[in-house]
Image (cartoon, rainbow, N blue to C red):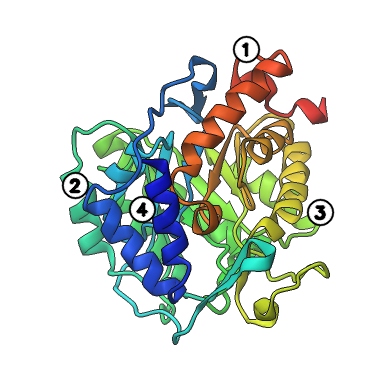
Amino acid sequence: MSTIHDLATRALRLIDPETAHHFALLGLRAGLGPRARADKYPRLRTTLAGLDLPNPIGMAAGFDKNCEAPDALFAAGFGFVECGTVTPRAQAGNPKPRIFRLSEDRSVINRLGFNNKGLDGFVDCLSARAGKSGVLGANVGANKDSEDRAADYVLGMGRVWKCASYVTANISSPNTPGLRGLQERGALEDLLGRLREGRAQLEAAHGRRPLFLKVAPDLDETAVRDIAELALTYSLDALIVSNTTLQRPDHLTSDNREEAGGLSGQALFQISTHTLRLFAQALGGRLPLIGVGGVASGLNAFAKIKSGASAVQLYSALVYEGPGLVARILDDLDGLLAAEGFDSVAEAVGAELR
């Protein structure tokens, strides 16, 4: 069966990236995706911010923006799935073309701009899953033309709270002008203060949920320390490190390397892992981290974990490896943990920093 999925992945790479993505989602929704047991390896069971995960490999936000195929992603073996980014109102995003494969570099550049169908449809899809198993996160953002972006995050959090396993505020996309400015200390204090206020009311009505913040890889050490400090002050439950990068490493060879937008995939691995380590050092174990950026193998996932990540997420690697990649990563990661004498994922977290 994996051969069929590999052939389908190769076929999709022959067409426009955004069309290919659309067909991949349709295929998953039709039940054509791979099947892998998320709980196959007891050693991979772990917890993240109080959430019990069958394994630490998650689907990053951006693949399933409208929460249309989470069940198929769980069936492929993911330990948790994050849908979104969703904005209060539907928006078309930036002009096409806006996704570019850098095949020689096993990377992708996108400048989508939070294209999604809006909160109403997203919440309907979330609600339809009520009672089903699987840790399903909702990633919320702000509309491009919003006059009060912090209010958009509070609204999004409120709408998804009841049905999501956790909520992520995404302030790190490079494709909505000015959005990354929310990472600056003053703006972030305002946002986190308003989220904390809204969260208190939601917890009183519907119970507790973990609240995560997704940050960019393009941060200096001062910004990392500021964000780490504020994350603790405002009682966030985890940081997702990181989103796509605006950097263009010298080793890129693809003709598409100069396209505007955020770079993800293999070329992001070193950059995002460096930022992950900075956060791990700044936080000293006081807050869990989710490592994202360039994860395409069990070895990559293991490196993120040893650099301080309690769990990891991936997306761009699926463009090149197909959805069967998840099962291969789980196999490899279990073997790597065993080979280095770790009985659990938790034991390996931050091993390189100790």
Q: Nearer the viewer, mark 2 or mark 3?
A: 2
Q: Identify the residue position indicated by label 2 in the image.
A: 127
Mark 1 vs mark 2, CA separation in Å: 37 Å
- Contact between labelled residues 3 and 4, with CB atoms less than 8 Å apart: no
Quadrant (top left/top right/bottom left/bottom right) for the C terminus:
top right
- Contact between labelled residues 1 and 3, with CB atoms less than 8 Å apart: no
Mark 2 vs mark 3, CA separation in Å: 40 Å
Q: Identify the residue position indicated by label 4 in the image.
A: 157
Q: Where is residue 335 shown, x and y percent of the image?
A: 63, 22
Mark 4 vs mark 2, CA separation in Å: 14 Å
Q: Identify the residue position indicated by label 3 in the image.
A: 221
Res 78 label: none
Residue 179 at least partly seen: yes
Where, by quadrant of the figure, is residue 291 drawn?
A: top right
Q: Where is residue 265 shown, x and y percent of the image?
A: 62, 58
Q: Where is residue 305 shown, x and y percent of the image?
A: 67, 33
Label 1, residues with CA under 10 Å away: few <14, some 14-19, many ≥20:
some
Q: In terms of depth relative to the viewer, which is nearer, 185 or 110?
A: 110
Q: Nearer the viewer, mark 3 or mark 1?
A: 1
Look at 20% across and 42% down and name the residue there: 129
Q: Where is residue 279 shown, x and y percent of the image?
A: 72, 44
Mark 3 vs mark 1, CA separation in Å: 33 Å
Q: Nearer the viewer, mark 1 or mark 2?
A: 1
Where, by quadrant of the figure, is residue 271 drawn?
A: bottom right
- The amino acid on which the numbered mark 2 sits, given as a three-letter code, is Ser
Q: Is residue 80 left or right of residue 246?
A: left
Mark 1 vs mark 4, CA separation in Å: 36 Å
- The amino acid on which the numbered mark 1 sits, given as a three-letter code, is Asp
Q: Earlier in the sequence, mark 3 or mark 1?
A: 3
Residue 159 at least partly seen: no
Q: Earlier in the sequence, mark 2 or mark 3?
A: 2
Q: Is 122 drawn above or below residue 88 in the view shown? A: above
